[in-house]
Amino acid sequence: MLMKDALFTRARALGFGRAAVADPRPMNRWLQAAQADPRPNWANICFDPNSIMPGARAAVVLAYPYRPYGRRAGEPWLDAYYVASNTAHERAKELAEWLLNQGYSALPSPSIPYKPLVERCGLGRYGKNGVVAVGELGSRVALQVILTDAPLTPDADLDNPGFSDECKSCRACAVACPTGALEADGRVDMDLCLRALVRTPPVPEPYRHLFTSLLGCDLCQRHCPRNRAVVDIDMPDELMRLIRLDRLLAGEIEPLSPWVGANNARKGRVLSAAALVAANLKRL
């Protein structure tokens, strides 16, 4: 079996729905866009994979599919993306270990932008809501990248493919966004995005009444036609118990870490979000 075939077979066994290989050259167009943005959104991101891993010959791009959790009236909620992202992060480490066992160097989850690599290798297309969609999986995917010196041929080499035909004439995401964070050109105003605001408390007063989610927003994806094939599932019972507001406001936050990762389960962040959600659901 060819190396790439064996790698992709292993990736599927770990739950990744799609995989592709991208050229790890610098992402100059995205760097220019970041430099034109005065906000520190890209402060810790590198746009040259080879400065992260010298000698990298390939970027393995992975899409881990998930299904969104349905909302229950009057109950707190969190976006299933964060659970999927945490799982995908761990599975990428397993796949990197597999590459190491084949005799190659491998660096999982490097601090580089993933979306331009998804476009470059033809795995998915960027959307007006600032996220990429991967075929029938839609944008309901958690992305991961592994840099490696394995001799893997890129699956495609596209330069700025632009929006898909379906996305070009659509403004559903921009209309659905309650804060006007989406300019319908692929740019997201992170000073208005609810998903970003809850991660950097305190949330500005004009937007506090919008929060019934402890983590994430999901509205732009829920209204995106690219996700028409992805249906909701119920939140796992154990997770429902862990996000009970009485538990969170009492400081029982650490049990969330295995589900969403330690970074997303920071005590101050979760307590701030729980207080907002409790107020908006009239649970105080």
Image (tube, rainbow, N blue to C red):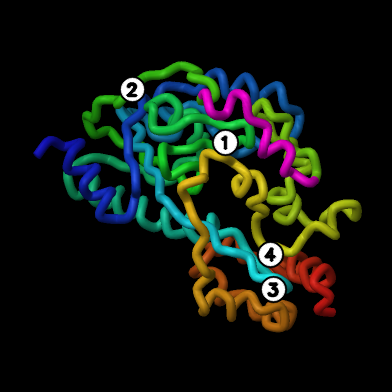
How far apart are labels 2 and 3 at the CA level?
45 Å
From the image, state whether disc 1 or disc 2 is nearer to you: 2
Q: Are discs 4 and 3 less than 8 Å apart at CB? A: no
Q: Which residue is mark 2?
A: 156
- Closer to the chain start, of discs 4 and 2, is 2
Answer left or right for 84 relative to 267.
left
Query: What's the residue at 70%, 48% (across, down)?
Result: 196
How far apart are labels 1 and 2 at the CA level?
24 Å
Image x and y of residue 127, in percent? 57, 32
Instruction: Find the magenta span and give its range.
Output: 165-178
Q: Which residue is mark 4?
A: 214
Dot label at residue 75: 3
Badge 4 local density, few (<14 within 10 Å), some, or many (20+)? many
Q: Which residue is mark 1?
A: 45
Q: Out of 187 and 145, give the one closest to the viewer.
A: 187
Amino acid beneath label 4: Leu
Residue 177 inside the magenta-drawn segment? yes
- Secondary structure, mark 4, is strand
- Closer to the chain start, of discs 1 and 4, is 1
Badge 2 local density, few (<14 within 10 Å), some, or many (20+)? some
